[in-house]
Image (tube, rainbow, N blue to C red):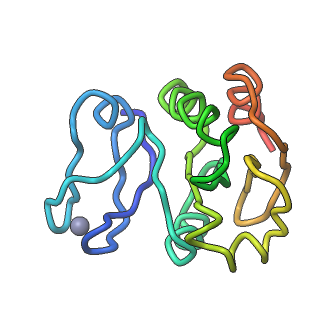
Amino acid sequence: MRKTLTVCNKCDSLNNVDIEKSNSQKPVCGQCHSILKMYGAVSEVNEKNFWRILKKAEKPVVVDFWASWCGPCKVYGPTFEEASTKTDKAIFLKVSTEQSPELSQKLNILGIPATVVFKEGVEVTRQSGALSLESLLNLANTSY
Ligand SMILES: [Zn+2]
């Protein structure tokens, strides 16, 4: 099973999800059985759940910082989703800079879209602007 970590929107439980399942059928929360909202294998998280996943993650975490007013972010979204279903070497998260302004400030996100990779809770690299599927997969498949 190719797994990724996500958080349930209803009960806040961390869930291990089969990436193929998240892509083809709606995965449900192991705790409360609500449908887990995912985009491909991407989970959208708030600041609290961002840190929880970072702490639990046994592989690199690739994060897309975005905003609803940002045109290039919208173009980038589907590429990010596609990448998430093509590799299980990393966990893919989306953070809205509008909904989590404090987190974005802490991490010094100056321009969006920004793709930041964390390993064992620490930032290892970041790229600004929309990336191609190929460079995104390279980022995800690098051993940091
Ligand atoms: Zn739940």
Q: Is residue 63 visible?
A: no
Q: Quadrant of ligand 1?
A: bottom left
Looking at the image, residue 42 sits to the left or right of residue 124; the answer is left
Quarter of the image for the C terminus: give it.
top right
Q: Quadrant of residue 6?
A: bottom left
Question: Residue 3, percent across and down?
Answer: 42, 41
Please state which of residues 24 and 4 is positioned toward the viewer in this rendering: 24
Looking at the image, residue 121 sits to the left or right of residue 107; the answer is left
Question: Residue 57, percent across and down?
Answer: 56, 58
Q: Residue furthest top?
A: 134
Please state which of residues 37 and 14 is positioned toward the viewer in this rendering: 37
Looking at the image, residue 88 sits to the left or right of residue 109; the answer is left
Q: Quadrant of residue 100?
A: bottom right
Please state which of residues 72 and 9 is positioned toward the viewer in this rendering: 72
Compared with 108, 134 (above or below) is above
Question: Residue 95, percent across and down?
Answer: 59, 59
Residue located at (65% from left, 53% from top) = 66
Q: Residue furthest left?
A: 33
Compared with 74, 94 (above or below) is below
Q: Quadrant of residue 20?
A: top left
Residue located at (39% from left, 35% from top) = 19
Question: Residue 134, percent across and down?
Answer: 72, 19
Q: Is residue 2 visible?
A: yes
Residue located at (28% from left, 53% from top) = 36
